Image: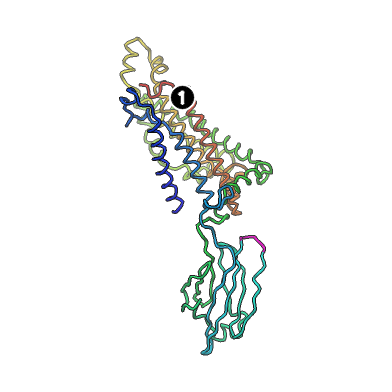
Amino acid sequence: MIPLLVYVVIFVVAFYVVRFIADKTAIQDYTSLKTVTFGDESAVRSNRAASVISIVTIFVIWGAFTGSKLLPGFMHAPGPFIGDTSFTYTAEANGQTDDATVYFRVHEAGESVEPIATEPGDGFAKNDTELVAAWRSKLLRVDKNDDIGKDEGAKVIAINGQPVDAGGSVEVDGGVVTLSDKGTPNFSPHAGWQMEPIWLPSPEGVFLRTIEIASAGFQGFTLWEHLGFSLYRVILGFVCGAIIGIPLGYAMGLSDWFRGWFDPIVEFMRPVPPLALIPLVIIWAGIGETGKIILLFLAALWIMAIAARSGVSGVKISKVHAAYSLGASKAQIMRHVIVPNSLPEIFTGARVAMGVCWGTVVAAELVAAEKGAGKMIVAASKFQNTDIVIMGIILIGIIGFGIDVLMRYAEKVLVPWKGKG
């Protein structure tokens, strides 16, 4: 919740700062004053400053809440308590009470440290010393070295002088002591706002693991083999879906019979998520490569069919009438009117279908895959290799974004008339 609030605050501040700078540096002439852009989608372009600030903000927040060494210390969120602390407990036994102190040394996980040296002290309750890793807790059998133990009627009645019952908690230096239902103190060091590396590693940790996997590989395959095989599956499934889906969409857009015949099937399958088809695909095609391609084919098929149908239906009838009046045949109308005017919708559908296929490939590779980005992520999650999981997610996102950029560029080159009537 706190990282989200930080992101929102940075967004608002950056928005007004960039707007202020843009207003001060903008050229005010007659043309700029009379141009109306509000509500004109074609006039809205991605603000590069906003894009850069957004990406930098995400990485800064990520680094701040993971204690990244890439950021100066003052930008770090409060981290977990690490150091020495202590608390005093009061034990009661056979009508008498006694105080003893427990000394704690809180250390980083995986670090080897020596416990604090201490004397047992006088009385039946003896001093204790314990080690605990940051983000962990320690259940204390404080009576293990006491002269009178819990089995003989001893019980903890206060922490640092504050009376406490079973289930109660007391704030102490560096953490919280909670009395369990059986009266055993449990010390939990303050966790701070930073994430434990096992849940969210730092950016440099993920980068270093990426370099390691790229050179040494993961589970018998290189990083490029994992990513390349996923990309191969996605492209093959998408191409198969487009080859069938686009002609089907054209047929549905041009023929009432085809539309009546296939529209119920397409509209029925369109809302069904591809992941729901996995059990059926396994039954029909097994767990081999064919099943994965079929799943990605089905993920793209209905989207491409609807995009092509929408593109044909959106062609202005005035253009068709104009072509007929000029003596064009049906084949010429199809080639010079229908296809060019439907291509923008098809490209939009292709971008959506490719995104869906990328999102489906991870699930497709859950089914007995030997290599692939999804397989790499799933295998890493079983061993809690969070850095590899995040690495895979980032690389999948980068490749997906790259594919979308290429498709937008291809659309710009192949369909330059989009949005120009």
- Looking at the image, how many numbered discs can be counted on the residues? 1
Nearer to the camera, 69 or 59: 69
Residue 370, percent from left and from top: 63, 44
Up/down of 411 relative to 381, above or below: above
Residue in the foreground of this view, choosing between 225 and 263: 225
> In the rendered image, is residue 265 in sight?
no
For the rendered model, the colour scheme is rainbow
The residue pinned by badge 1 equals 412
Q: Amino acid at mark 1?
A: Lys
Near mark 1 (Cα within 10 A), the count class, few <14, some 14-19 or many ≥20, is: few
Quadrant in which residue 23 is drawn: top left
Q: Main secondary structure of the magenta part?
A: loop
Could one spot residue 37 in this view of the protein?
yes
Q: Determine whether, in the image, residue 347 is placed left or right of residue 368.
A: left
Q: Is residue 21 magenta?
A: no
Magenta span: 108-112
Describe the element under mark 1 as helix, strand or loop.
Answer: helix
Q: Position of residue 272 (x, y in %)?
A: 42, 42
Q: Is residue 220 left or right of residue 319?
A: right
As drawn, is 176 to the left or to the right of 42? right
x and y percent of residue 181 in the render?
A: 49, 75
- Of all residues, the one furthest to the front in this rendering is 24
Residue 410 position in % (x across, y down): 49, 25
Quarter of the image with the C terminus is: top left
Quick check: is 111 in the magenta stretch? yes
Quadrant housing the N terminus: bottom left
Vertically, is 278 above or below 191?
Answer: above
Question: Which residue reaches farthest top?
Answer: 327
From the viewer's perspective, is residue 341 above or below residue 142? above
Where is 138 relative to 225, above or below? below
